[in-house]
Image: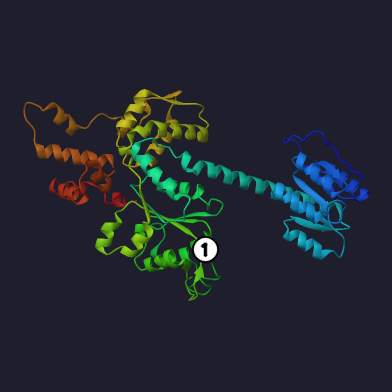
């Protein structure tokens, strides 16, 4: 059986023009196609039967396959199925005879990109091949992006050698292979969403969607329709039936960040999803089944909210099947150098800054700083220094003022014990004032830093007349 092939001894260099494989036992049509495609600056391989085409496909990096449906050896449909199994992102264009529409439809169902019917014009084949190649590149780029995302967010890539972090990661590692609901707790900036992505992309749902919803960022009037979807006409502006996040995340994972901000009126509907695996769209009465893993996160104490009547106890226990608490950065200081190096590399790549280094003095200062904003603050600090530094090494002078400046006035008084005496109340006032300044007036973070309750801090602020000097704008701090 005759087989014709061009450039079969060597796989084309991918820096060159796209490679198109033509499979057709009609020699004259094959030559016409080859001529037209070469005029369009494509590289071309040709085969006169399905088996020869399959052999060329497996030995070359084919960017587009054009195949007739009726060929000896392998039919076009069988060639389509086999090449799709080898490299599904390669688009296949099927050539059909006039009146063979049913077979063309079957080819489309089997994964063909498009079909053209004989006779066809030069413009038609050129445009179809161009569209097919654009589609193939998009599919390949999307697959590569998914691979990079999987690599970035797999649990093994999460940095932390401290005992506190290793204990948290050990617990996380044991739930990835399950569908158990996970509740991640920890201060703002500790990496709760990163852990949620690690659970998803290391588990059996990794090939399906991961959707994140910040419950605090959606107005209470919109959160129900956002999560559960709505029926056309359910409210003003509902012009079409619309899926909610639960349906969009079907077979994947839905990450509910700041779950403490979920309105109390909506918590029963979330409980129903966890118990029954079904949702009801706004404006409908018929439930719809959904297969979604839920991971929730919060930086607040849900048990306290249960006592206050602002969070349902039954929902808490459904969410906290596996609780994971992430330690603040100040309790895993040994991880700071590793994290700093990691963020330095990423920032240098992002801003094309070459290979900067961090001096020992900077590492020492970073390790002593409490980082109330945790890992997120460390990352932002490193990026700021990368952008502003003028040398090849990040020096102490490049540190932000609040990290670089020496110990505050109150601490100096305690250490030096001036002979003229001191006022303990004045020392306490100075400590609280400087702690508030260090945390931008954020009272929650300041109380945590001073290891006292928030109510105790507020009492002392009132006692020393500090409340009026701190802007209320800083109280958008609970996140």
Quadrant housing residue 452:
top left
- The crowd level at tag 1 (other Cα within 10 Å; few <14, some 14-19, many 20+) is many
Task: Inspect this view and state whether residue 9 appears.
Answer: yes
- Residue most extreme to the right: 28
Q: Is residue 83 above or below residue 271?
A: above
When the figure is inspected, residue 213 is found, relative to residue 21, above or below; the finding is below
Residue 221 visible in image = no
Which residue is disc 1 drawn over?
247
Outermost residue, left side: 420
Is 61 located above or below residue 388 in the figure? Answer: below
Q: Residue at coordinates 22% horizontally, 32% vertically from top-left? A: 408
23 relative position to 306: left or right: right
Nearer to me, 214 or 301 = 301
Colour pattern: rainbow
Q: Residue at x 75, y 50 (%)?
A: 82
Residue 372 x, y percent position in the rendering: 31, 41
- Residue 3 horizontal/vertical position (percent): 89, 43
Viewer-closest of 328 and 121? 328
Which residue is at a point 31% across and 52% down the rendered structure image?
478
* Residue 269 in picture, x, y percent from top left: 41, 68
Instruction: Locate the N terminus by quadrant.
Output: top right
289 vs 74, left or right, is: left
């Amino acid at each position: 059986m005759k087989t014709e092939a061009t450039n079969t001894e060597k796989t084309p260099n991918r820096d060159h023009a796209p490679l198109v494989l033509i499979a057709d036992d009609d020699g004259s049509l094959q030559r016409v196609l080859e001529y037209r495609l070469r005029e369009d600056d494509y590289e071309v391989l040709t085969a006169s039967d399905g088996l020869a085409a399959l052999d060329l496909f497996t030995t070359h990096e084919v960017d587009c396959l054009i195949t007739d449906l009726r060929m000896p050896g392998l039919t076009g449909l069988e060639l389509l199925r086999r090449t799709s199994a080898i490299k599904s992102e390669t688009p296949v264009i099927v050539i059909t005879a006039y009146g063979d529409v049913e077979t063309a439809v079957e080819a489309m169902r089997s994964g063909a990109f498009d079909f053209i019917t004989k006779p066809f014009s030069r413009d038609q084949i050129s445009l179809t091949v161009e569209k097919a190649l654009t589609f193939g590149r998009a599919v390949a780029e999307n697959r590569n992006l998914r691979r990079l995302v999987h690599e970035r967010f797999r649990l093994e890539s999460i940095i932390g050698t401290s005992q506190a972090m290793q204990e948290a990661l050990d617990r996380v590692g044991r739930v990835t292979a399950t569908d158990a609901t996970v509740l991640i707790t920890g201060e703002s900036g500790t990496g709760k969403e990163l852990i949620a992505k690690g659970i998803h992309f290391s588990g059996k749902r990794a090939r399906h969607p991961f959707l994140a919803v910040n419950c605090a960022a959606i107005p209470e009037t919109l959160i129900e329709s956002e999560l559960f979807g709505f029926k056309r006409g359910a409210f003003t502006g509902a012009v079409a039936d619309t899926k909610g996040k639960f349906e969009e995340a079907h077979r994947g994972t839905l990450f509910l960040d700041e779950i403490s901000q979920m309105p109390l009126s909506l918590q029963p509907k979330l409980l129903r999803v966890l118990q029954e695996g079904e949702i009801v769209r706004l404006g409908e009465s018929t439930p719809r089944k959904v297969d979604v893993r839920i991971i929730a996160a919060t930086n607040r104490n849900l048990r306290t909210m249960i006592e206050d009547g602002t969070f349902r106890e039954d929902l808490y226990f459904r969410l906290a099947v596996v609780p994971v608490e992430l330690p603040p950065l100040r309790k895993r200081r040994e991880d700071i150098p590793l994290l700093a190096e990691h963020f330095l590399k990423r920032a240098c790549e992002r801003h094309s800054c070459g290979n900067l280094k961090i001096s020992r003095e900077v590492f020492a200062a970073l390790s002593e700083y409490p980082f109330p904003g945790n890992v997120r603050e460390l990352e932002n600090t490193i990026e700021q220094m990368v952008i502003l530094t003028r040398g090849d090494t990040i020096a102490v002078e490049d540190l932000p003022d609040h990290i670089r400046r020496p110990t505050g006035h109150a601490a100096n008084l305690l250490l030096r014990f001036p002979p003229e005496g001191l006022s303990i109340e004045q020392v306490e006032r100075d400590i609280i004032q400087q702690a508030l300044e260090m945390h931008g007036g954020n009272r929650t973070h300041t109380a945590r830093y001073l290891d006292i309750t928030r109510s105790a801090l507020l009492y002392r602020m009132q006692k020393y007349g500090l409340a009026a000097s701190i802007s209320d704008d800083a109280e958008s701090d609970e996140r």
